[in-house]
Amino acid sequence: MPTEGISAAEQIRISPVPVGRGDLLALADRRWAAAASGTGHLLLLAGEAGIGKSRLVDDISVRITGVENRFDASAFRRGSEIVGGVLLELAAALRRSKHPDVADRLRTLLFAGAEGGDRARRRRVLVTDLADILSDFLGACGPTLLRLEDLHWADELSLDVLERMAGSLRGTHTLVLATYRTEELFPGTPLRQWRDRLVGQRLAEEAHIRRLDRAMTAQLAEAITGSVLPSVYLDQLYARSDGIPLHVEELIAAGAVTRVPGSVAEAVLLGRGALSPRARSLVDAAAVIGRSFDIDVLAGTIGESVDELDAGLTELLDRHIIVSTGDGTNFDFRHAMIRDTIYESIPPSRRRRLHEAAGVAAIVAEYCYADVSDHYERANLPDIAYGHALFAAADAARVSAHREAATLYERARRTAPQDLPLSERADLYARLASEVAAVDENEEAVEHFAMAIDLYRSAADEVAAARLVPRLMSTRHLVGDPLETRTRLALDALARLNGADIDPESVPPLVRFELFAALAAAYMLDRRLYTAIEYGTNAAAIRLPQDPDDVATLAARVNLDATLGSVLVFAGRMEEGWRLLENAVTTGRKAGIEAETARAFRMLGSSASVLVEYDRAERWLEEGLEYTERTERWNDHHYLASHLAHVCWARGDWQRAENEARRALADGRGGITTRVTALIVLGYLGVGHGELDEAHSVLDEARVIGERMNELQRLSPALWGLAELAVQEGRAHDAVALCDRALRDSERVGDAAYLFPFLVTGVRAHLALHEVTAAREWIRRCGKLISARGIPGTLPALEHAEGLLALGEAHWVHAREHLESARSGWEQRHRFWEGTQASIDLASGLNRTRRGREATAELDRARSLAQGAGARVLELRADAVSVRAAEAPGIAPLSEREFEVAGLIAAGATNKEIAVTLTIAPKTVGAHVEHILAKLDAARPSEIAAWVAEHRAVAR
């Protein structure tokens, strides 16, 4: 029966039939049929606010048959602050559906958390255990529909659990319908990453809900009103609603069919104004509580009994402003937009009073601390909000819910009492900084760490301040602060600890140890190796407790071993460095300190990759990938994958290199260092494949990142790729400039590891400009650094460069000696790119000494390697270096350059590819082709190819 005083027309604001959603309903029918037969499915329904996601879920629920279980859970605005908020809603639904045992297990585990190990491990175990509870329950159920709405407001823990659960859905009879707003899918957000992983791994299917067109809008309006509407009215309705169903419904409900309200907000407020005073009071209180509310909290907020709410709630239900979500004690606003509009219309003073009352009611109802703190902050009662926010933040931090913890610590900071002791305020800033840093909000983290340090010092606690300095240093590095700024922090902290007013016995050895270790790490990142070794040695000399249960000390030792080991191998002290790095991994694994162990794997694998120790690199990178996958350290995992991609590129396994690099980029859980390494690998592949535009694009992006990070190890590899590209494109002057820039950077820090490929590329560039003297000086300058370091994997570059110079000076015997040595050295190191080129360079020299058969053998070997990797550029270059005219009778009509062009034509190269291979202009290639055709009395390129094949056969 209609509520008294409400006309039937006013109550009809929902279409009795779905409009414009036939394709999505049919899709859901198919997915339900599969789920009911034992092949469960996760269907993501995405669309903008008001598009009808909830209505579509309702329509699907009505259509499907044979449902034995149905469970509903929703996220809500500010719900992202509540750790496991969606899971708590689901637990409530399970309890209402007579499954209290499962509900209690979920709630107990959420509130207790996991035990053992560091926070990251406890988080991983918690996610696994929660997902297992749900998966086991659903696996034992018959046909089940699970509805999860508004996941754009979901907390990260809930998303992580749902993602893990998705992997087991296919063996159940469950269809999960999950909705979220498309406008919340910003790149880099947890929701976007969650969605990309599920869809990318085919664990879920996404369907988009579109706006209605004009005809559909008219159909919806006429279904709501039950009458044919004037065309002018429908035109206005379509224009103002933008084809969004919620807008259509609210606009129709608020006005007569002769006038459309100016906006949806106006329509919502007109509907509120038409309510009885009693219903208006209830709807305002409900809007203050949130999108979802239960009847007990609503009663407590307005200070009445539950029985006194019946008439007002019935009116709100009849007008479709709210909907019941269960047993009649829980309600939602029909749409968040309706709730938000009503909330914003409440006068500020009344809104504060309602928030205070809602806070009291929420405490009585045992709502979570996060919700209570929000109410009290909005009620302008900061002292009460502070305590609840602090408790909620600690709970979130305990399970590594970093984003939620950061939000709640920020609320605690805003609401902290003015007379809070300095040490407690410093603790608050330190915790806030740690959580903000964990979600890569590094600018904020720098600000908060610095404030915490200043507060500790104001409280005369230099030790507590010094403990935070290494964290501030590493965070300042991420925002691009210069080395001197970062190292000054540690040096100042050490000086303060050595001050006359500090008792040396009061300073724990670990504090000084970590400051020296932080200095070593800072100088390592800047490639100032000897200074890094000095500070690392100072740290190692500090005697620390030998307690095997002292996790903090073990973690510090592992980090120092990884830092010092990496520095030593780059400084040429290979055996000592590798031993320290491997010990760091072994110790970390044994102690179960996951973050430090993952870092040790990163340092070991990436160092070996850069230093041309590819067997060692592949072994440790693959072990590290297995470890980080098992421990779910995805940032570290993709970092290792990007370096494995580099190893695969270097060894000539280019297909795997591309797969690993693209996978590292696609997942979305890798950091900026992962991205730059993967981009560099893709750029190198583009150079080798001859895909020059693609190579330019990704290498330029990598260069920009490297320049922004101001790190040699990020920038130099990108510059080398761009230099190789410039040589291929005949831009020798640009190549020289890039090589000179890289040399200056390496000279500044005494680097050889990143310099060695520039030695060979720089010689090629100088010789292309006929600058033999400059090439010799280039070898001298680079060779000085490379020889001084003596890193075995870099030394073949010296022989290769000397061989190229000897070729340029027509010293054929010396060229052959150097190039044979270079080729052998690159082969031993499995360095495909330079090794294959060394064979081609050697063949070129052999041609000039009339050793055609030996040259052919080298070229055949080079072609085979190039073809195996898909290195089109090297394959064409091998074809260009052909048997000299003097060794093949009848080749005399063509010059040496013309024969090179003819050989490439025979290999099927285009004029553009020939220009890149020979580093000449495309117009020059065209001229050579015309001359060749004329000299051979040929009419088409195929005749040139036949001529080349004939005379190469003679030469063999």
Image (spheres, rainbow, N blue to C red):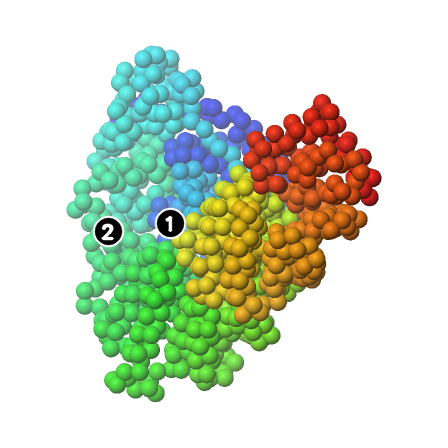
Q: Please tell me whether residue 278 is drawn above or below residue 131 in the rendered image.
A: above
- Whichever of labels 2 and 1 marks the residue nearer the N terminus, that label is 1
Image coords of residue 266 (percent x, y): 25, 29
Image coords of residue 412 (percent x, y): 28, 60
| Amino acid of disc 1 | Gly
Q: Is disc 1 placed on a helix, strand or loop?
A: helix
**Count of picture labels:** 2
Residue drawn at (27%, 72%), measured in percent from left and top?
456
Any part of residue 899 in sight: yes
Furthest residue in direction left, as rendered: 349
Q: CA distance from mark 2 to mark 1?
A: 16 Å
Q: Please tell me whether residue 620 is drawn above or below residue 134 in the rendered image.
A: below
Residue drawn at (31%, 50%), measured in percent from left and top?
297
Quarter in which the C terminus is drawn:
top right
Residue drawn at (67%, 51%), measured in percent from left and top?
841
Image coords of residue 460 (percent x, y): 24, 77
| Amino acid of disc 2 | Arg
Residue at image mark 2: 378
Any part of residue 900 in sight: no
Image coords of residue 210 (percent x, y): 45, 28
Residue at image mark 1: 79
